[in-house]
Image (cartoon, helix red, strand yellow):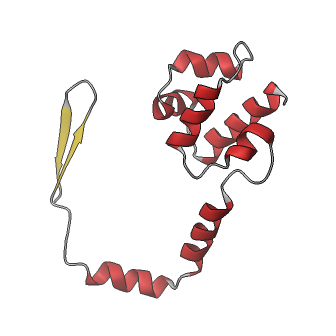
Amino acid sequence: MEIKEIVHRIENVMAHYDLSPATFADTIGVQRSSISHLLKGRNKPSLDFVLKVKTAFPDININWLIFGQGNLVDDEHQEKEKTMRLSSPTKRLDAVASDEKKIDYIVIFYTDGTFKSHKEV
């Protein structure tokens, strides 16, 4: 198992989800500096790190991430995405149009205890 290859696959995960290293670190729950050290080759990804990636991104194929086997996304998740893409767009529009509920108010809570609220117009 080549560490550089795992790091390259981690970079692929970030690219797949269009995440910066900082956002990726926040998403999986590690310090931003640990991602920087990992990408620069100073640190190796631990099992805990790999499990955090899998927990944050359950559709990631763990065999691909660790061993490079298979595809980035699990076959099961790929099949679900394919089914969603193949479903009729008119059916999806009908479902949206028949839904009477509309967003009225949005509140975003931050981990520091602050929040931001938005009233839909």
113 versus 34 height, above or below: below
Q: Is residue 105 left or right of residue 67?
A: left
Residue at screen point 63% across, 47% down:
16
26 versus 116 height, above or below: above
Residue at the extreme right: 2
Measured as percent of width and height from the top left, residue 72 is found at 70, 50
Measured as percent of width and height from the top left, residue 33 is found at 56, 15
Q: Quadrant of the C terminus?
A: bottom left
Residue at screen point 64% across, 27% down:
47
Q: Is residue 58 left or right of residue 73?
A: left
Residue at the extreme front: 47
93 versus 121 height, above or below: below
Residue 90, quarter of the rendered image: bottom left
Residue in front for this viewpoint, 53 or 41? 53
Measured as percent of width and height from the top left, residue 96 is found at 33, 78
Residue in front for this viewpoint, 48 or 24? 48
Residue in front for this viewpoint, 27 or 98? 27
Residue at the extreme top: 42
Measured as percent of width and height from the top left, residue 29 is found at 47, 28
Q: Quadrant of the N terminus?
A: top right
Residue at screen point 58% across, 76% down:
83
Residue at screen point 34% across, 82% down:
95
Instruction: Give the mark count.
Output: 0
Residue in front for this viewpoint, 88 or 53? 53
